[in-house]
Image: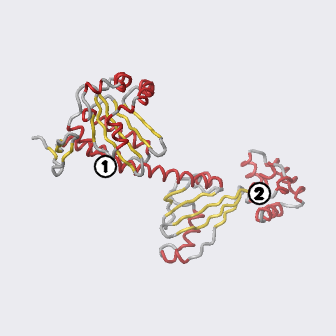
Amino acid sequence: MRTHWHASRKHLQTPFGGNLMYDLKSRDLKLLTELLLIVYAADSRETYIHTILTGITSLIPCSYASYNEINLPAKEMFYKSHGIDQALYESTQPAFKAYLHQHPWGQRVLTTPDYGVRTLSDFMSDRAFHSLALYQEYYRHLGISRQLGVSLSVPPAVFIPIVINRDGRDFGSRERQILDVLRPHLTQAFQNATAWDRLNEHHSSLQRLFQRINKVVIQTDRRGKILWASSGVEDLFRRYRLLGPKPSPYLPSPVLDWLLKSIGRDDPQEMLLSSSKPLSLRTAHGTLTVRRLDVTKGVRLLFEDQPYHHVLDGMFASQLSTRELEVLQILAAGKGNKEIGLLLGISHRTVQKHLERIYTKLGVENRAAAAGRLWDLSNSDP
């Protein structure tokens, strides 16, 4: 026995006073449910449009479907099609635009608050439609004589006609019912997708800002497990030698230890009341400063990268060559001549020659004094 669905005996009004009772089969409901799950998962407008066009053409037999987005105040129109040769479609668009004013359903969308499900045959006979220049110069070349469409309205003034095209038999009650069931969901899913676009753009702008100012933001739970991080965090940890031998979802050990000591391990109140003295990590690369910004929902940390080439004054940098400055920075991190040579790809004897020239230029006598001079200058105010 076939199973039917009667949605509280809901009816579709036709332009001619009749009505159609929902009578979709269980198979149709399953396909609609599967499509809606995908549509609601769309995390961008582009994904939303692609999902609609491919989904509807799989539900309703047709030659092709088109998505049209019209912004009346801005006089902007965007359209995309699926299932048709794009070269042919593009070549016929001038004719479509020239005779669009003859389209009865299209004009109704733009002039009245009518966002229901409509076909061309709701407005005119086949003979009348075939007599239009719109058909002769456009639809006839695409092999189209039948149209079924639904129009969505998104405040304040965006209209979204979604049109299904084919030749042969006209669209029936099943196709109308499918679009009528989809209509409110497609409107809400569009708003969701555009909200995702705004959120993604905001996120991208923050990422670009952090990159420009040499900062990284990381959000963790109260035990230091990373929940979210802005871009560049892996490169930053690599430069400061904070990456462990194996990938870990937790903060690097020096940062994790500082965090747990500063906020307390278990007591949320202690987290709120504890001091937030920043952590400073010095290496041959520069100074990494970590500040705790927020502990209301997890922990948010700000990592500020201060490479030495950003903080050393011009006079000091002009005293040393690029290689000598590299040697001095690594020396200041506590590395011996062999380690410096390995890091820079030079012999330890060459390292020693560089050091001798560095001592002379800086007016110091040993490694400790040279490193001290670097720390003094890198900690001075710009």
Q: Residue at x 40, y 29 (%)?
A: 99
Please tell me the numbered disc located at residue 184.
1
Q: State which quarter of the image contains the C terminus.
A: bottom right
Give x and y (percent) for residue 323.
80, 48
Q: Please tell me whether mark 2 sits on a helix, a strand or a loop.
A: helix
Image side of residue 23 versus residue 210, left or right: left
Please tell me the numbered disc located at residue 106.
none
Colour treatment of the image? secondary structure
Q: Nearer the viewer, residue 30 or 179?
A: 179
Residue 237, quarter of picture = bottom right
Q: Nearer the viewer, residue 59 or 317?
A: 59
Q: Residue at x 31, y 49 (%)?
A: 184
Q: Is residue 304 above or below residue 92?
A: below
Residue position for label 2: 331
Q: Residue at x 90, y 56 (%)?
A: 360
Q: State which quarter of the image contains the N terminus.
A: top left
Asked if the residues shown at circle 2 and circle 1 are in contact, with their CB atoms under 8 angstroms apart, the answer is no
Image side of residue 115 versus residue 297, left or right: left
Kind of residue at badge 2 = Leu
Kind of residue at badge 1 = Pro
Q: Nearer the viewer, residue 30 or 344?
A: 30
Of the residues tagged 2 and 1, which is closer to the observer? 1
Give x and y (percent) for residue 378.
77, 62
Q: Please tell me whether mark 1 sits on a helix, a strand or a loop.
A: helix
Query: Disc 2 or 1, which lies upstream in sequence?
Result: 1
Image side of residue 345 versus residue 214, left or right: right
Labels in figure, total: 2
Q: Is residue 169 above or below residue 370?
A: above
Label 2, label 1: how many angstroms apart (C-alpha)?
67 Å
Q: Residues within 10 Å of mark 2 (few under 14, many from 20)?
A: many
Give x and y (percent) for residue 130.
30, 24
Give x and y (percent) for residue 180.
26, 44
